């Protein structure tokens, strides 16, 4: 199995040193960056399995770095927030982060979150449906390449946005509650709440719908959950 590769970004060098040492104990290859500009340079020039990204950084904030990375990569990103602030968490998800951890944190929790994300990514790489492409009207999902196309135009989705859309598209007209989506996509050990689902659905609609307020694909069953309307 290929060595996992991580990028750790924080301006507190002791934190970076501690995370790096711990991840290297698990045979991960670790690169380190100490400001937003350096982090973007690393992310553009290398392939990573995971990025740990602090919110408060010199030059560019973690939110800005996350947003820019999402323009060219779906690499899983865990945001490190300095305080237990719901707005920081929601903003991180809005900008495309997959998870968040509040400082101060236990390194064992960090490693557990990384392993959980790696398991989900590995599982998604195995196409258990037997379908390489899923088509509905003008929409086409490439399950192996993890790409979405509408009218042959590629739509850039984050890893979680793709997974939500893929699940709904594979089960058209089936309504999933927010709790069900949270467990199926983020896992039972995910510490976030159902607002995570709402944020991702909103972002997904902004990307795939001509008019997000009047969706064609991903619909809401009020008081129940979300579903994909089969054409």
Image (cartoon, rainbow, N blue to C red):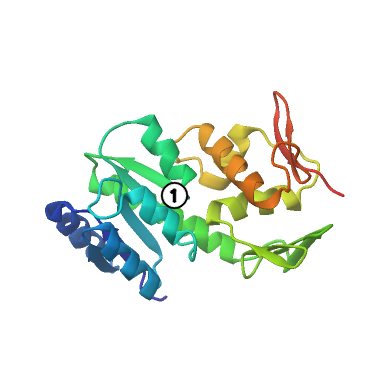
The furthest residue to the top? 223
Q: Position of residue 156 (x, y in %)?
A: 59, 60
The residue at 30%/54% (across/down) is 60
Q: How many marks?
A: 1
Q: Residues within 10 Å of mark 1 (few under 14, many from 20)?
A: many
- Left or right placement of residue 12 versus residue 64 in this view: left
The residue at 67%/51% (across/down) is 165
The residue at 23%/63% (across/down) is 33
The furthest residue to the right? 231
Helix, strand or loop under label 1: loop
In which quadrant of the rendered view does residue 48 lie? bottom left
Question: Vertical placement of 78 versus 88: above or below?
Answer: below
Does residue 142 appear in this view?
Answer: no
Q: Position of residue 22 (x, y in %)?
A: 21, 58
The residue at 24%/48% (across/down) is 107
- Left or right placement of residue 183 versus residue 58 in this view: right
In which quadrant of the rendered view does residue 132 lie? bottom right
- Left or right placement of residue 53 versus residue 147 in this view: left
Q: Position of residue 83 (x, y in %)?
A: 27, 34
The furthest residue to the left? 14
Quadrant of the rendering where the N terminus is positioned: bottom left
Name the residue beneath numbered marker 1: 97
Question: Vertical placement of 107 versus 6: above or below?
Answer: above
Does residue 122 appear in this view?
Answer: yes
Q: Position of residue 90 (x, y in %)?
A: 44, 37
């Amino acid at each position: 199995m290929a060595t996992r590769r991580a990028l750790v970004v924080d301006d507190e060098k002791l934190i970076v040193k501690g995370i790096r040492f711990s991840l290297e104990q698990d045979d991960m290859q670790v690169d380190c960056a100490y400001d937003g500009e350096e982090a973007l340079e690393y992310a553009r020039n290398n392939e990573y399995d995971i990025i740990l990204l602090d919110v408060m950084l010199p030059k560019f904030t973690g939110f800005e770095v996350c947003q820019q990375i999402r323009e060219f990569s779906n690499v899983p990103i865990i945001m490190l927030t300095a305080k237990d602030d719901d707005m920081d968490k929601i903003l991180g998800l809005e900008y495309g982060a997959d998870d968040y951890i509040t400082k101060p944190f236990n390194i064992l929790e960090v490693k557990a979150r990384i392993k959980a994300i790696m398991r989900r990514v590995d599982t998604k790489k195995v196409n258990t449906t037997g379908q390489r492409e899923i088509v509905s009207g003008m929409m086409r999902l490439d399950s192996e390449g993890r790409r979405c196309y509408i009218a042959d135009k590629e739509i850039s989705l984050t890893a979680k946005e793709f997974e939500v859309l893929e699940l709904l598209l594979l089960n058209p007209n089936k309504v999933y509650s927010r709790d069900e989506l949270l467990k199926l996509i983020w896992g039972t050990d995910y510490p976030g709440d159902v607002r995570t689902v709402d944020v991702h659905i909103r972002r997904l609609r902004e990307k795939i719908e001509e008019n997000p307020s009047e969706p064609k694909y991903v619909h809401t069953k009020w008081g129940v959950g979300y579903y994909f309307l089969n054409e």
